[in-house]
Image (cartoon, grey):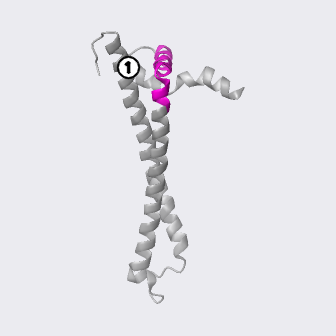
Amino acid sequence: WLVDMYFDHFEPWCRNAYMDLALHGQPFVKSALHASLVNAEFMTTVNILNGATWVFQLAGLGAITSLGHMQTCVIIRYYPGFTDPFSGDFVQNPLFLSILGSVVGFVMAFPFMMIFDTVSDTILFAYIVQKIREEKDETPTI
């Protein structure tokens, strides 16, 4: 019931409405409805791209988080001040700092992966609109 309500009432107000608004300059409600129609016409392509984008986002977040962890581990292990117990910079618990490096990597990667999702949706939406215009023999403006 809740999922049906979302798809019936809130799905048309997605970010594609803003893309359609920028492309056509219509009022928001008309843009939202047109964006829903455009997405419905090429639903399989949209679903494939969303699935692929999700995989790339997950891989990007995982890779950058892992690199943050590994970089912190390497720095702690090979910097002489961090391994010398008589140094003021000695790291007694490197696990905490390596986890903190992972968290920093994740926090830094997250906005970029979200932008990747938005850009891929925008490129797909513009491509679909261009295909629709070419089918109607309109002059493409993209």
Q: Nearer the viewer, residue 42 or 13?
A: 42
Q: Main secondary structure of the magenta part?
A: helix
**Residue furthest toward the bottom?**
86
Left or right position of 72 against 8: left
Q: Does residue 84 appear anywhere in the picture? A: yes
Picture layout, residue 10 above or below residue 62 = above
Picture layout, residue 113 above or below residue 44 = below
Q: Does residue 88 appear anywhere in the picture? A: no
Q: Residue at x 37, y 30 (%)?
A: 123
Magenta region: which residues? 28-47
Q: Which residue is mark 1?
A: 129
Residue 40 x, y percent position in the rendering: 50, 20
Residue 26 x, y percent position in the rendering: 41, 14
Picture layout, residue 22 above or below residue 52 = above
Residue 2 falls in image quadrant: top right
Q: Residue at x 45, y 14 (%)?
A: 27
Q: Nearer the viewer, residue 89 or 102?
A: 102
Q: Residue at x 35, y 19 (%)?
A: 131
Label 1 crowd (10 A; few <14 / some 14-19 / many >=20): many
Q: Nearer the viewer, residue 41 or 96?
A: 41
| 5 falls in the magenta region | no
Left or right position of 128 against 28: left
Image quarter where the C terminus lies is top left
Residue 77 falls in image quadrant: bottom left
Disc 1 marks which amino acid? Val
